[in-house]
Image (spheres, grey):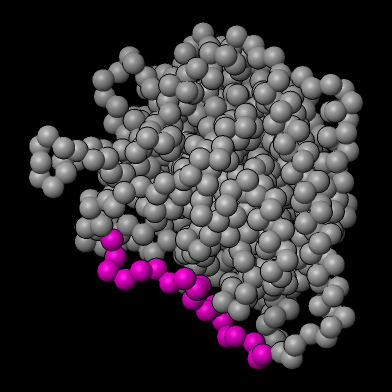
Amino acid sequence: MAATAISHLRRGAQRHALLCLSLSRRRFSATAASPIAAAARRLLSTTADTGTSSSGEQYKPPPFDPFRAATLSPSAPPLESPPIGDEPPSSPPPPEEAVASEAAHEQATLACQEVELEGLKAGVEAVKSREESPEEKEAWWLLGRAVVNYCGSAVGTVAANDPSTSQMLNYDQVFIRDFVPSAIAFLLKGESDIVKNFLLHTLQLQSWEKTVDCYSPGQGLMPASFKVRSVPLDGNSEAFEEVLDPDFGESAIGRVAPVDSGLWWIILLRAYGKITGDYALQERVDVQTGIRLILNLCLSDGFDMFPTLLVTDGSCMIDRRMGIHGHPLEIQALFYSALRCAREMIGVNDGSKNLIRAINNRLSALSFHIREYYWVDMKKINEIYRYKTEEYSHDAINKFNIYPEQIPSWLADWIPVKGGYLIGNLQPAHMDFRFFSLGNLWAIVSSLATQRQAEGILNLIEAKWDDIVANMPLKICYPALEYEEWRIITGSDPKNTPWSYHNGGSWPTLLWQFTLACIKMGRRDLARRAVEVAEKRLSDDKWPEYYDTRTGRFIGKQSRLYQTWTIAGYLSSKMLLDCPEMASILICDEDFELLEGCACSLNKSARTKCSRRAAKSQVLV
């Protein structure tokens, strides 16, 4: 570990930087960046605009790919985001005093960013110098063995490298969601080139237009995974070239497109920029276009009346039929986080004003919707238990016509007196009361949950440790679907049997997200306790994908061994616990301005009635 004095200085600098950023980030995002600011950001960057790597080597784009070119859209994606809503009338130029004030504000913001960057660089050096356990050394060796190369550069890691099976299915591919914990581990260790290559190459794959039965997905969709293939060059059987072959869901089980891939990509892009200072990558035209295409796809208008994203089963980590279609919490938490991250990275200009306005409106509405309607504790369940139904008015209490009989029998005895959680789903006449770990943890990390709610979630996990952690952290959801409910909802899925796989299985990869949430809330003791539980078994059990049974005692019956995100999640957790200030690359603090400005206030209709005060009161409790 680094010396105590260095550690103390680093923490002080980090706190100062976070304070500066929390006070200035929102105002900075609402103003156009000056040439001086852009130049200063480039000076802080470790990468030139032309794309040099952090090690000083020139980044070389991959050669022209005929396999990819054959499926590209004939028209290039627009460089400017499509308009969202009507453009406001042009305003007169600001006075000189305002311009000077903004310039001074930008300089203060850049100074804070520089302090933050120096603290993160010191953290990386501390991570490099820390003493590793035998389990960590083994994990790093396995992670290195999982690296995938394309045209001589590392571009990702395979999902699993299990020598005990000959049926690899798609476990030999690079998944966007699976690579995120690997990327975090590499970034914390100071190995950022593989992350940069991954971000740029997956961005190239965004414009593919693969189809399912002759139907093309929306522009901006990111693939679920990709694989490096060797194809003959110009029909020559002796000469080959490497191509990236993506899967947008057209080859996946269930043929479902991934909604979370683009969201994870944006989150990882922000983390890369914060820890490396390579803001030039974010400012590249192709990267800015990629961000906007993802956001345009997510923010497009439709028939849905809710600010949450409407998705089908199998569109996220739970990629099989598990009754999460509709508005699952996991997608909403990642959506909120991606919007927060994108708002920091989007260049402010005349072409992006509408998009930034749409992001702010959606963030405001989404945070209120989730905090107000997804949260349950003992008080809320008592309220639902006494709901009146068939209410018709703008003042209805039971807005979604929830029938009290939907409260499951297990919930009344399970939920603790102190604590609560965000339910898994909400639709008309339907509340999914299952506890989904990833959605709740990422709601804490992204500040989608209020401070009081975040504390309640961790209190619940601590109180129900034997149910959610037990012999292996963490349950992907609780409780499992059983008996007739399992047959109807999963379609009698033989892989999702009760307390297995996605149906109540235990997933060690969730450890790094649990660690992030605990660090943010000042509960590192809980994270260390969970890591100690995992450390006792993971290496001996050959790093499996998941565990079975109610308490996670058995290795999953169809679990792959040497699962990469199990390995990377463990490594990331260990490094974050030793250098908790590094968690800032992924954490978003509460944005109080979102509580002041509500999308409802933009609507002049007399029928619009906002409950923003209710959400604000939760933060102030």
Q: Quadrant of the N terminus?
A: top right
Taking the spot 67% from the left edge, 82% from the top edge, the residue there is: 603
State the image coordinates of residue 310 (x, y, percent, origin top left). 49, 60
Q: Is residue 269 left or right of residue 516?
A: left
State the image coordinates of residue 369 (x, y, percent, origin top left). 66, 61
* Up-down relation of residue 472 to residue 337 (above or below): above
Q: Is residue 270 magenta?
A: no
Taking the spot 52% from the left edge, 47% from the top edge, the residue there is: 52
Q: Is residue 369 left or right of residue 548?
A: right
Q: Decide whether the magenta segment is chiefly helix, strand or loop.
A: loop
Taking the spot 43% from the left edge, 34% from the top edge, the residue there is: 154
Q: Of 515 and 486, which appears nearest the observer?
A: 515
Quadrant of the image occupied by residue 69: bottom left
State the image coordinates of residue 207 (x, y, percent, origin top left). 36, 59
Q: Is residue 573 visible?
A: yes
Q: Which residues are magenta?
A: 72-90
State the image coordinates of residue 462 (x, y, percent, origin top left). 74, 28
Q: Of 192 and 245, which appears nearest the observer?
A: 192
Q: Of 478 and 344, which appears nearest the observer?
A: 344
Q: Of 543 and 44, which appears nearest the observer?
A: 44
How many numbered marks are there?
A: 0
Q: Is residue 75 magenta?
A: yes
Quadrant of the image occupied by residue 24: bottom right
